[in-house]
Image: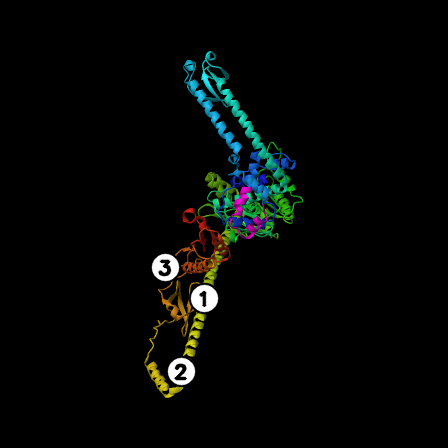
Amino acid sequence: MLQIIKNLDLVEYLDELFALFARNKPLFIEGDTNLHLARINELCEYELKELKSVKDLSKALNHLSKKGILHLDEIEEFVKILNYFKYLFQIPFSNSFKKYLEKIIIPNEIENILKYFKDDVFDEEKDELLQSIKIKIKELNQSINQNLRSLLNSKSLESYLIDTQIHFISNTECLLVRGGFAKVLDASIVARSSGGGFYVEPSSILNYKQGIKRLENEADAKRFEYAKQFSEILSKHLLFLKFINKEFDLIDSYIARVNFAKKKDLNFITPSNDDKIILSEFCHPALNNPKPVSVEFKEQVLLITGVNAGGKSMLLKSILAASFMTKYLVPMRINANKSHISTFKEYISIIEDPQMAKNDISTFAGRMLAFAKMNGKKNFLLGVDEIELGTDFEEASSLFFTLICELKKHGKLIITTHHKRLAMLLAKEDKVELLAALYDIKNERPKYEFLAGIVGKSYAYETALRYGISASLVELARKSSSEAEQNINEMLNKNLELDAKLKMLIANNEKKENKLNNLLESLKDKENKLIEEYKKRKNELENEYFKAINAAKKTLDFSDLKDKQRQINAANVLKQQIKPESVKREEFKIGDFVKYEKIKGKIIALNKNIATVQTDMLQLKLDISMLKRSGEIPKSNSSKVTYEKSVSNASTKLDLHGLRSEEAIELLDKFISDALIIGFDEIIVYHGIGTGRLAYAVKEYLKTNRSIKSFCDAPANAGGFGAKIIRL
């Protein structure tokens, strides 16, 4: 694994992740990957305290299995683990992580042990004897200090003292004196100074030192009693300790990944098993300010050709790295909503030149050795950079073609090459996809973009010029190439340009279609809401009408029918005299430019009160009362869709603080619909952190809304984890 990590330029990136682990462990997490990912995503909703560094406890567990006695510092490592689980128990998790924690029960005897520790360290203050020993040792140290100070102030020793400091040599308090000190001081020499003096330990403090040592031995004996008592209890629960030690590594793996993702604003990808790899806006972690890569790899072989230094090798590494990190649940910078990444049993890269004097092997021989090791392997993702290196290209094309056709039966391959003959042979094969790195002829530099379905040109002459080869030499090389080769290259260039234009038109049309679909869905939602409001109001009015009729019937008195009839006739006369105010409707005709909310168009048909309005994207049938006059709409560009954004009462921010999840989602849905019609590309929603339930509800809703391109936590100065930036 270390070699593939190195070849994919992931060493520094993964070292940052490993630094967040509480103790060393493998990158791979055993068990159900989807379950692990669900738990990690749930933990992302909470702010958890960091794990303390914990030592490897394999030897301690083995010692307990033999009824051995652990040191208190070893027991403290177990206490760290147990206390962190107790901390997790206090957090109101939900879903799978809650169920996971509910299965972990700390035995009562071990709970009692934890009471003897404070901040994961054995608390000696809970034992009276240890506390009294601590006080006595402190008093003896003070006596030693006083004794030495009195000696320093002694007139008889004054002429022998080199200085008036108390020195610590070999963990012993000493005085620095000149030769002949024995005449006035009973002391033992500890060491010589560089200036010729003597570091001495006065005999008068030896009794104090012996007293301290005796007390320390007594304290050690007491600590041993505790260690023995604790070890006996831990031995009884050895199976639980093995279990909790293993689960701690799992929790450590989760929390390190969560903190890593939050620290760098990264996303996790749910792995798939259908052999398809679709990357959307992926950024390789080894690059500074990289251009995001979007690529689809659905067949068995992806052949990447095209311009030198145009990003072919990095694209190969990006595809391999994205799948590798997905398998090992490593977060990455990617559009998770639009990406689909499969994982494989094994990842293999043939990237570096194996030629070394030490190995006594040629480039081609090293490549053949690497391919030979592929025999019998299945379910792999293989990356081969510059496959044609090291031998005659005519022979190599047939050889590599045969090898690739055989290997694609058992796994997926990503290959970069400048070998046109090999590319043409593979282009005719089934389950082979072509991808060309593009060159900007006008600006004479690579675009770092890729076009699917074609074989690209290397642009060797242009690359040579860009990297300093003289123009005269390049021109001489051009003239020496055959006319037929130049014609082929010119045709290839034209093919590339035409395909690039076609792809651009298709992409623009897809973008326009997506905006149309979003607009139609928004209009449909508004129509449904209006219908519901109409039905609701109609029912309310009908109920009020029937209530009024029934109430009127109950009050009717038929005893004076003629008088009632006269009153009704008089009321009818008054009714006829009332002239309702007519609602002035603006009159429109075919050809008028109108607008409905922020949508502008032209009336192309009228049928009573219904107008058919042609916008730059679609036709709408609207009631005339909903229309307003507008200036002539600008002619739209066939490959570009734009919206007017100058809205007086529009806002790009929504605050959901204090709302229940159902209310917040309903308000968020309307806010996004309005933003789409107005034409906002980016909005921000504040949901806060709190218990995490509202944040979780918002995140789940955003995942399901097809109108949203992507979303992420806001920067620290704009709300941090309590807000989401949404791109429409």
Reading the chain from its start, which is encountered first: label 3 or label 1? 1
Tell me the SS state at disc 1. helix
Q: Is residue 177 left or right of residue 58?
A: left
Give the residue type at disc 1.
Lys
Q: Is residue 41 magenta?
A: no
Tell me the SS state at disc 2. loop
Tell me the SS state at disc 3. loop
Q: Indicate the quadrant containing the C terminus: top left, top right, bottom left or bottom right.
A: bottom left
Within 10 Å of the Cα at label 2, are there few (<14), some (14-19), or many (20+) other Cα atoms? few
Q: Is residue 721 above or below residue 603?
A: above
Q: Is residue 118 visible?
A: yes
Q: Is residue 632 left or right of residue 73?
A: left
Residue beneath label 1, please? 529
Q: Which residues are magenta?
A: 82-105
Give the residue type at disc 3.
Asn
Q: Is residue 388 visible?
A: no
Say which of 386 and 721 sits in front: 721
Q: What residue is shown at x 49% (from left), y 15% (from top)?
A: 186
> Can you tell which of label 3 and label 2 is closer to the viewer?
2
Residue beneath label 2, please? 556
Return the x and y of residue 479 as percentages of the image width and height.
50, 43
Q: What residue is shown at x 33% (from left), y 84% (from top)?
A: 570
Q: Is residue 125 above or below residue 401?
A: above
Q: Which mark is residue 649?
A: 3
